[in-house]
Every structure is written in C-alpha cells, then in structure tokens.
Image (spheres, rainbow, N blue to C red):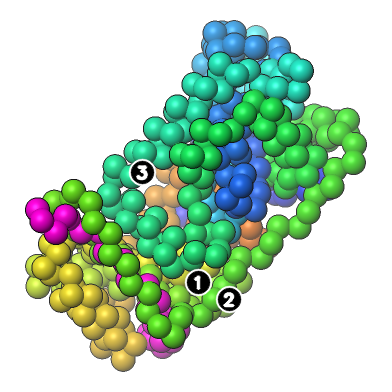
Amino acid sequence: MIMTKIDKVNICKGVDFITVKDNRFVTSSVSATIILPLDKETASQNALLVQMLKHSCKEYPDFTALNRRLDELYGANINSVVTKIGDCQMLHLGISFIDDRFSLDDSSISSQCVKLLCSLLFQPDINNNSFDTKTLELEKRCLIEEIQSEISEKRHYAINRCTQVMMPDEPAGLNRLGTIEQAQNVTAQDLYKTWCNIIKNANITFMLLGPSDSSDIIEFLKNKFADINDRNVKQLPKAIIKEASDRIREQVDRMPVTQSKLVMGFRSTCAYPSKDIDAMKFMTMLFGGTPSSLLFKNVREKLSLCYYCAARYDRQKGIMFVDSGLEEKNSQLAKEEILRQLDRIKNGDFTDDDINETRLAMLTGMKMINDSQWSMQSWYINQLLDNEFVSPEQAAEKIESVTREDIIKAANMVKLDTIYLLAGQEDA
C-alpha cells in the first residue's frame, strides 16, 4: 500500500488545516468543511447557503465572471456538497486544480485557487445584508428537486424513512437537506444571518489533498482569519448513542411501487471511540457487506427472498441497517431469515473461509481508496469528528487483527430496534 503523510495545523479557534500529502497525482484539491449541529430549523438554510456561495463573490459577482476566472486557473473546478455524519451536518465547499509545477508562467496556482475559495466563503455577493433573491429562487428550485429526487429513488427513500422512524428525537433522524417546506420559506435575509453565524461560530476544517505545498496556504489562511474578530466557536455535541428499544418499532408506508423495500434498524452501544469498532465493521461486512456475505448467499441467492440484501454500519451512532428489495409477500420470511443469519454469527456458525473472503474484500476496498483523490478526500472527511485520523493503510492493519471471537462479540452487541416496510398500494 502507498503511505500518505497527514499533518494537522490549527489556524485559529475552531479552524484547522489538514494536509494529506500525495505526490502521485497531478492535481490537488482544497476544501472547506463547515461542521454544524444538524437542526430541523436550519438544515435547509445551511444547504442553500453552500450552494449560493458556490456561484459568486464580490470580485466575481456572476456565474460568467467566476467561470472566466476558473478558466484562467487552468480549468479549476468549484464543487459543493452537503452530507450528514452522526448528528452533524457537513457543508463542503472546495476547489480542485492542477499542481503548481504545470503552470506555464511559474505562478502559484494553488495560492490563487485558495484565494478564490476564500473569496467565495468570506466575501460573498451580499448587498444590504441580503443575498441576491433571483439566484436564491433558482437555488431553492434546485434544492427542492434534489430532495424530491431522494423520494423518487425508493431504496434511498426507504432508508431515510427508517432512520426517521428509528430516531424521531435525534438529529441524525433528520434529512441532511431539510424539507421542501423549509426550503420554500428561506429568505435572502435568512441566508445572510446564517452566513454571519457560520463565519463567527462554526467549526471549519480546511483540507489540502495532493502534491501541492501547504506552507503558503496556511499562512494565507492565518492572515485571513486574523481579520475576523470575536470568533465564538461552540463545542459540537456528542452523538447520541442509545440502546435498542424494549419494544420493536414497526412502520409500513404504501406508495405506488412495484418492488417493496424492507429496512431493519439495529442498535448497539459500539460507537466511536469504542475499541470494538473494527470488529463491528468486520461483522457487518461478513453479515451483509460483500457478494460472499451470509445475507447475499442465503437470503438472496439460496432462498431467493429478495432482489438485494445488504448491511451497513454507522460508527458514529452505533447503528446497523439492513435493507432489501423484495416482493411484499416475502417480507415476513425475509425478516425471519435476516435475523436467523445474524444469530448464526452470534453463535459462531460461520467458516474460516467466510472470514478470509470478508477480510480480502475489505482489504481490497481499502487499497482502492488511494486510487482517486475523491475517495481519499471522502475517507478523511468522514473522520473529521474523530480525535485522530487513520489512513487506509492503518485501517487495513486493524482489519488484519480482527479475530473470530471479536466478530462473535460484535454480533452479540447488536439488537433489532426498528422494522420499516415500503410497500405497494393494497388495491394494486
């Protein structure tokens, strides 16, 4: 595996800069990740804000001017995305660009791109304490369409609905983008207040990934934040970890679908920074994370109870989801068989070949992370709430050390909490 060098520097209170040095790439990327508590009152405002920041700033007040500048920077690219990790909402604003050594005039492309990123973040196109209303209306439509697209993609929708049913009073139960109603009601003045709050109060992590040098960028950011007075950064709340409810929650929704979706939510207290996390990841993959998993081989292939059946684990919340696409008439049998396969792991009823195949699949996946900057960036961004960063190479070493006993112990930490079924109309 290729070893990467990771350095972390504090810029000021609540602002860090992370360098992931990798000389294999000809491009670099710098991203600003704004970390906020996920809140139903502000989720849509935050999501809209990062989209607004992506398109203009005082220096380049419209899309045409900004694109012209990006072309001058050898085709640099601005990107933004909103994600959810645990009980937090993450707003990502980034720029990718070719490395300085490819500049035709020996200018520092990285410094110019970071300056442009900071202009978007710190000097947005604001007039009279308000963002542009016409641009906002366009972004509202885009956000609403994105929320609606999640409803249209039924597998994703079913997982979201199970999450809501399972965690009605936890931030993680909220949609990362908020709701259509909230998005419709956001005003240009609301966005200005949101922006002010973020600049003065939010935790922000900058990340440079690639071959570019970070020293000039760090100095630039330190000078930039020196101009911002009275940063009052609040500590992020710890993720809420709960044990499974004594009574299993069950919810059935009906929509005009031809393929039903079954999602089962399991709780455990094995969440970051538990020493059993690696065993829980391994157990989840053996259970339903690979083509050689027990769920795939038995529920899907052997018994033909579903079209797909997969398990995933959220280490921030200590939660495991199993989701499957099936015919409604098979839903009860599928539930019983999924639980039976979990009981098999709890009782140690799996082979050494099962362990070896799972380990190989996990190690192969970790090797592939280093193949692209995007996957590497995602890997490290997903660790922003942790106390330290673990490289794919270090994670692979931990997976190598997981034993059969560790897997059995992890499985016995898991308990069913919620069953959600998205089914077709009863009269169909």
The residue lying at 33 percent from left, 51 percent from top is 156
The residue lying at 65 percent from left, 53 percent from top is 37
Q: Position of residue 326 (x, y in %)?
A: 16, 61
Q: Tell me where the magenta segment starts and ends, as one range.
A: 399-428
Label 1 amino acid? Gly
Q: Is residue 230 above or below residue 315?
A: above
Q: Nearer the viewer, mark 2 or mark 3?
A: 3
Residue named by callout 1? 318
Contact between labelled residues 2 and 1, with CB atoms less than 8 Å apart: yes
Label 3 amino acid? Glu
The residue lying at 37 percent from left, 62 percent from top is 162
Residue 91 magenta-highlighted: no
Query: Which mark is first along the chain, 3 or 2?
Result: 3
Query: How much space separates mark 1 and mark 2, taking CA atoms?
Result: 10 Å
Residue farthest bottom in this picture:
347
Label 2 amino acid? Ser
Q: Nearer the viewer, mark 1 or mark 2?
A: 1
Query: Which mark is first along the chain, 2 or 1?
Result: 2
Query: How much space separates mark 3 and mark 1, taking CA atoms?
Result: 24 Å
Mark 2 Cα-neighbour bin, 10 Å: few <14, some 14–19, many ≥20: few
Closer to the camera in the image, 427 or 248: 427
Residue named by callout 2? 274
Mark identifier at residue 150 = 3
